Amino acid sequence: MSKYFLYARKSTDVEDKQVRSIDDQLAVLRALAKTEGLNISEEFIEKQSAKMPGRPIFNEMMERIEKGEAQGIVCWKLDRLARNPVDGGQISWMLQRGIVQHIQTHDRSYRPTDNMLTMSVEFGMANQFILDLSANTKRGLHEKVRRGDYPQRAPLGYLNDSRIKRVVVDRKEAKIVKAAFELYAEGDSRLEDIVAFLAKRGVFTLSGKVLPRDRAAFMLSNQFYIGLFQYAGEIYEGNHETFIPKKLFDRVQAVLADRGRPRKKPKNEPQPLCGLFKCGECGCAITAEDKIKRQKNGNTHHYIYYCCTKKRGACSQPHLRDGELTARLSEILQEFALPPDWAVELRAMADRDEKDAAQSTLAASQAMQGEVEAIKAKVQRLLTAYLDQDIDREAYLREKAELLSRKKSLDEKIADLKRGAVAWLEPLRSWIKDMENTGESAVSPSLSDKKSSCPENFRLEPLSKKPSYRIYPHYT
């Protein structure tokens, strides 16, 4: 009496997916073998995809069949045995040679004397299914990223919400990650310090280990935290919530870039106001020198002088003490500063203009919105006609695609209309804020704040032969 091997397979090794399919296969195939009077000598159960050759349990079964331990196979369908041309060809060849005398599935049987075209078609369909699945998966992922959905595991400070299939902020961990960014942006911490900072506050890898140094560096340079992410070598704009401001992220990148260069101590430490001024006589840059005066009684005095680099030849301009230059710069910033009452009035005017612009675009957008609602109604009627079998599937899909394409175009036009009417207001509001900050920088003791609030290319010109200067912005 011929012996049979029972083969059952599921397409993934993840325990919470398709687990029941194995039990269903076994129950049906055991009942089938009993009904058909097939002698099952052994059962083979495999939890692995068949899209690639090299399944260990399948290979073991085929080797034992070649040795004559069984003459037939009982399986759910042929695609359980193979979804690639290598394994499919091996089964077909063994069936033709009579090594496999019978393959029994739940709905039909295959023998060496049967037409091999049917089996070849089924194996071809199984292989094509894998090819289509791969293409559809890639297409689905690309569509997902085009919508702004992150297709991978969420970085630190975020969670993958399985309910809505989106990346959401982990409120507790996000505060720690932001604090790590702020700490590193100060410029006094190493990556090892950031790792220790995160570990002290309970941020570890999924396996519970301390984050590697490279993982901390990747976190600090990950554009995901400012709303961007990379997929397949291309940058996409995400629709996830961010908690790291762009300015903070840029400061961290500057620190990372600075620490990545070889550090060589300069003869003169760069001063905050270097790079801001140009000489009014020759147009060269203004640099700074750190001078030390040592008295006989042991006292030491440090002085900082700003002067022309004189890279274009002789220049008659003398040095200038940093205190005098800072005081004059504060006066200039006060002249540029926007009075508080002006800022309030300008913001109020901007708000009124925004309201007027919204009203002027309302009529135009309402007309297009009415067309959008009409399209939605048409799509619903089209679905009803398809369900009532008044139109075929091909016509339904074609008409639906055209309607949705038209709706998307209208949605974009409505959004562009609303944005275009008030697009100029954001730069205006940003300018008002900058001008307010200029007044704050003028009275701030921080020279870096003063420099960041200054227009570029200041000219430094003498008022007389004495070291007294006039400062004014020069635009080229």
Image: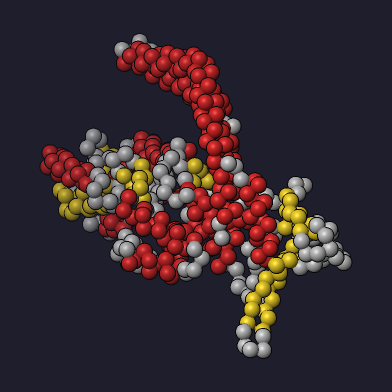
**In the image shown, does 263 or 412 lie closer to the viewer?**
263
- Choose top left, top right, bottom left or bottom right for residue 461: bottom right
Instruction: Locate residue 220 relative to residue 427 in the image: left or right.
Output: left
Decide: is 224 above or below 462.
above
Of residue 173 and residue 27, the one placed in the foreground of this image is 173
- Quick one: which residue is furthest to the right in this view? 314
Please name the residue shown 36% across and 58% down the image: 176
Closer to the camera, 21 or 199?
A: 199
Image color mode: secondary structure
Q: Count all numbered tags in the image, as a single digit.
A: 0
Give the image quarter of residue 268.
Answer: bottom right
Q: Quadrant of residue 203?
A: bottom left
Along the horizontal axis of the image, is 349 left or right of 300?
Answer: left
Horizontal and vertical percent for residue 407? Answer: 47, 21
Residue at point 49% right, 57% down?
221
Figure check: 348 above or below 203: above
Q: Residue furthest top?
A: 390
Residue 183: x and y in percent read 44, 62
Instruction: Say above or below: 194 vs 13.
Output: below
Where in the figure is residue 57, as x and y percent of width and height? 28, 56
Residue drawn at point x = 22 percent, y = 47 percent? 19
From the top left corner, tell me how far across and down residue 301 is, in percent: 64, 78
Q: Is residue 120 visible?
A: no
Residue shown at 78% from the left, 64% from the top? 467
Residue 157 in the figure: left or right of residue 75: right
